[in-house]
Every structure is written in structure tokens, then in C-alpha cells.
């Protein structure tokens, strides 16, 4: 997971995360770079639900993960 500007954006009030082939960080052994966010210790959820709507394109070796 990377914080490169090219890997995330907010469009129409929605968070958009991308994955790209790693050509920018040759010292990183990961073949792909992905956008992501950390919320641990930043927000607390009480009663209710968290809803995630995602469009995931097929990609060899992709491991999307959602957690709280």
C-alpha cells in the first residue's frame, strides 16, 4: 500500500483507490503499488453498520481486503 498521489482520489464525494504496476519505486520489491487508507485509532464506530460498495477489476494476484 502506498500514499502516492496517483493511487487515490476523491471524485463526486467517493474515495477512488487504484493499483498500478510498480515502475516508480525500484527499491520496493512489490510488483504492484496500491492505494489504501488506514483508519485504526482514527475513528470509532458504535451501533450501526459500515457499507462498502466497490468495483473490482479482475487482476492476477489481486487480494482486495476490507477490515475494521
Image (cartoon, grey):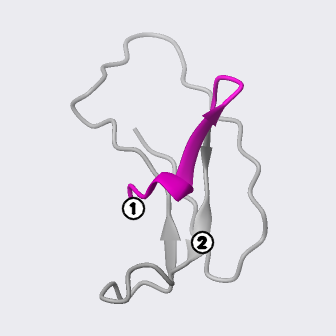
Q: Residues within 10 Å of mark 1 (few under 14, many from 20)?
A: some
Name the residue beneath numbered marker 1.
2
Magenta residue check for 46? no
Mark on residue 29? none
Asked if residue 10 is positioned above or below residue 49 in the image, the reply reads below
Name the residue: 51% across, 84% down. Answer: 23
Which secondary structure, mark 2? strand
Name the residue beneath numbered marker 2.
20
Give the quadrant of the C terminus. top left
**Residue 51 point in image, percent of width and height:** 62, 27
The residues tagged by marks 2 and 1 sit, at their Cα atoms, a distance apart of 11 Å
**Residue 24 point in image, percent of width and height:** 45, 79
Q: Which corner quadrant of the image does residue 50 belong to?
A: top right
Range drawn in magenta:
1-14
**Residue 37 point in image, percent of width and height:** 41, 45
Label located before the other in sequence (2 or 1): 1
Name the residue: 34% across, 43% down. Answer: 38
Q: Is residue 27 left or right of residue 16?
A: left
Q: Nearer the viewer, residue 37 or 28?
A: 28
Which secondary structure, mark 1? loop
Amino acid at each position: 500500500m502506498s500514499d502516492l498521489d496517483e493511487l487515490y482520489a476523491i471524485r463526486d464525494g467517493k474515495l477512488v483507490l487504484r493499483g498500478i504496476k510498480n515502475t516508480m519505486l525500484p527499491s520496493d520489491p512489490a510488483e504492484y503499488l496500491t492505494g489504501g487508507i488506514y483508519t485504526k485509532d482514527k475513528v470509532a464506530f458504535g451501533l450501526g453498520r459500515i457499507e462498502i460498495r466497490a468495483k473490482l477489476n479482475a487482476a492476477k494476484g489481486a487480494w482486495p481486503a476490507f477490515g475494521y
